[in-house]
Image (cartoon, rainbow, N blue to C red):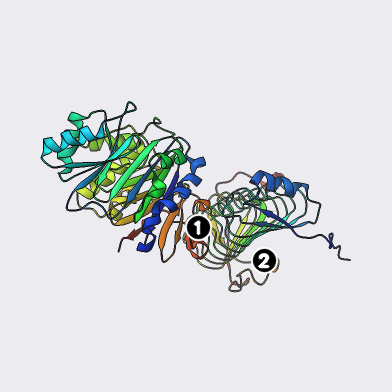
Amino acid sequence: MCGIVGLHLKDPALEPRLGEFLVPMIEDLTGRGPDSAGLALYDRGVPDGSLRWSLRGPDAGCDWSALAERLGEDIGQPADVKVKADACLLTVKAPADQVRARLGEIAPQVTVVGVGESMTMYKDVGTARQVCDRYGIEQAGGYQGVGHTRMATESAVTTRHSHPFSPAPDLALVHNGSFSNHASIRRRLEDRGLVFETDNDSEVAARYIGDRLDQGDSLDDAMRMVLKEFDGFFTLLVTSRDEFAVMRDAFACKPLVVAETDAYVAVASEYHALATLPGIDGARVFEPQPEEVHSWVKT
Amino acid sequence: MTQVLNPTVAEVVLSCRELTTRQINGRLRELPEGSVVRITEARGTHNLAVGLRHRLDITIEGNAGYYTAGLSDGPDVTVEGSVGWGLAENLMRGVVRVRGNASESAAATAHGGTVIVHGDASSRAGISLKGGTLAVAGDVGHMSGFMAQAGTILVGGDAGHALGDSLYEAIIYVGGTVRSLGADSRVEDLTQADVRRVRDILDIAGRDAGFDHVDPENITRVASAKQLYNFDALKNQRY
């Protein structure tokens, strides 16, 4: 089944309350996905070309300060850490490839959940409430957020297999549904050098879109190519630093409800997850049409 | 003589904030015949007013969730907002009215009764209809009327792609345009019986249901081309 929520704030005055709005939304869809939960949050970001890494440590714990110190020495730039339970946000001004490679060498037990200038990402096995509490999501601010509750149907229940998937800095994808030809597309992408972290079908769609963006597609075009290349059922929500886009397959049998006001665009698999939002009674509520990309760009 | 059902009974109010869905449906089941009920603060709650087998007059305030008034055989249900998937699924009897929009599969497999949507209905409206009536004042989404076996669908606005795919004996009337017909469905000439049937439905729907633009004499009739299905009425088979 799986549940999807997303909130794109148009009114900057609401930004301090992003987490406060998002937590009841994702928690409401626990029934659609009790296995795992994950969120990607977008805020005004880190300054001057730094990148913020969303990392998760092993069960045995991790000495984040020592890791930051060592990484900082190795790449010649100070690294700042902010610890959140078993996860940490590490900010450093260095190219993504260099940091990723270095982290792989000095801390192979640490998982890179996501990276970006604006995006932070948290995901784990457990209910939405557990995951939100663990990482203090309710207190988080920002201009955009997405969430996913997972009911696994085709691959294992682990942190790495849970959504969102982030194929590129500041890019997040959540998926409700299943792809039937993901293995073929994965092989094709692997032949071209793309690296996958899991055997999950949704990761293939995420990396496919990331690859199209690398080749110069707009996000809308990359999503439309998913319609041409992928078989299966899907409702997708894909977010970047400045865009928030949803799309459903031709059959549109995986639900999504959109509510738009002057202050926000909100989406959820089921309407009741939107019912707690301010001004929802006056919102324009609709379902995305099959095979159409509906997108909103940050102004 | 008009029988007045228990005119002294006060309206029963059931709040979705105070009661679980199971408690609400349990209370509805225990109410005497003819009770008037208001369900408040629905906020998208699924499965409200389902499985009821006696006559009640139920109003749901706000937007309701999936399967509203499904599996019912008697009550009249009015939703003052919009509803989610599977409105009045497998309805047997009663009038179910939605003043807003309905999501996918409205009136799916309904055997009887009348389902009236003042706004739009989404995909697969009237899928596998088995004798009930579905009237949508606005538009319907793709694959509406799919494999509908018996009954009537009236669409006041436009119909999406693949209307009436694999139709059996149900008849679909469309006031606006049809984006495309599904396999084995075709447009047929309108008869006086069709005009009367549409008028009857409009009478039940009432003047405030948003069908003012529908002209029963100038409407498109869609029915099965009968190239795919295997019922044979001449052999007295029943459906």
- Picture coordinates of residue A253, whole percent (x, y): 48, 47
Q: Residues within 10 Å of mark 1 (few under 14, many from 20)?
A: many
Which element is circle 1 on?
loop
Which element is circle 2 on?
helix
Between marks 1 and 2, how big is the CA–CA gap? 21 Å
* Residue pointed to by mark 2: B205
Q: Amino acid at mark 1?
A: Gly
Q: Residues within 10 Å of mark 2 (few under 14, many from 20)?
A: many
* Residue pointed to by mark 1: B141
* Residue located farthest toward the left when viewing the structure as drawn: A76
Residue at the spot 63% in from the left edge and 49% down from the top edge: B89
Note whether B224 is above or below A198 in the view shown. below
Is B102 on the left or on the right of A173, as rendered?
right
Is B225 on the left or on the right of A214, as rendered?
right
Q: Which residue is more in the foreground, A112 or A193?
A: A112
- First reached walking from the N terminus: tag 1 or tag 2: 1
Q: Which residue is more in the foreground, A285 or B89?
A: A285
Please identify the quadrant where the N terminus of chain B is shown.
bottom right
Residue at the spot 15% in from the left edge and 42% down from the top edge: A78
Is A288 on the left or on the right of B229, as rendered?
left
Label 2 marks a residue whose chain is B
Note whether A155 is above or below B148 in the view shown. above
Label 1 marks a residue whose chain is B
- Picture coordinates of residue A295, whole percent (x, y): 35, 58
Q: Which residue is more in the foreground, B198 or A261?
A: A261
Residue A193 in sight in this render: no
